[in-house]
Amino acid sequence: AKCGAVVLYEHLQKPEGAALVTAPRGAGMVALSSIDYAPDGEAYVKFWRSLLSNMGLRMHDVRQKWLLPTADRSEAGTIWRYTATQPAPGWNQPVFDDRAWKTGPSGFGGDVPGGKPRTPWSTDDIWLRTDFDAAAADIENLKLSVYHDEDVEVYVNGVEIYHAPGFVTQYQILPLSKEVRSAFKAGKNTVAIHCHQTAGGQYIDAGFLSGAAIRSSAAPVGHDLLLNGPQ
């Protein structure tokens, strides 16, 4: 007899890239499913939760905690201090006095695919600073979320933790190595960013999260049909 998960799967409307292979194994059956879609999307989590629950497996809730939300994860955006004028040396250090800088909510720039611009930025360069709190447990599974157009440098507590040339076309969620995480500390952390623009669209935003990297906007259109069950 087929297991409930296989029966459920066969009745689902599936997008291109979905495949299922089954083989008998002892008194039961092994089912291998291949589904070509974003593993960091809510649809991914919901589909597998539905499928595995149907098999009688018990699963814990996905844990995600935003320590510094990006613009797409906050209704009002995160408040940053910023300047378009070359700052003095040490601008990326926690002790730097940024009280003369302007303040504004993320993201910074103009309209780009998937961006949430709330503060205009049209110069060649922008420098950003803000603080956020972290518990020791948060740092163990820390990730950087960044959308840069174009060249970006990201510092935490004065230490460069990420840099990249050019631009991306959506938020990137990047796991941080143990060495990089050593720049963070329990308590208050200062993040500083420099973004340089040459031509075309421009946008900058960044944040930090602990736990699973799940985004509501990550799953391609159409995959929600996997969650509906039999017609």
Image (cartoon, rainbow, N blue to C red):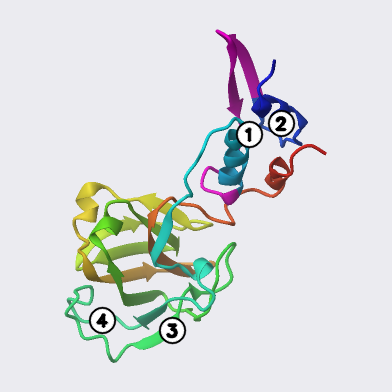
Q: Are marks 3 and 4 in contact (CB under 8 Å)?
A: no
Q: Are marks 1 and 2 in contact (CB under 8 Å)?
A: yes
**What whole-number distance in Å separates the C-alpha atoms at marks 2 and 4?**
59 Å
Residue that mark 4 sits on: 87
Task: Give the side of residue 72 with respect to residue 161, left or right.
Answer: right
Between 2 and 86, the residue placed more toward the observer is 2
Q: Position of residue 43 (x, y in %)?
A: 61, 47
Amino acid type of the residue tagged 4 in the rendering? Pro
Q: Which sits earlier in the primary sequence, circle 2 or circle 4? A: 2
Amino acid type of the residue tagged 1 in the rendering? Asn
Secondary structure beneath label 2 = helix
Residue that mark 2 sits on: 8
Magenta stretch in the rendered image: 20-42
Q: Is residue 38 magenta?
A: yes
- Of circles 2 and 3, the one toward us is 2
Q: Which of the 4 image quadrants contains residue 65?
A: bottom left
Residue that mark 1 sits on: 54
Q: Position of residue 20 (x, y in %)?
A: 65, 23
Mark 2 Cα within 10 Å, few/some/many (few <14, many 20+)?
some
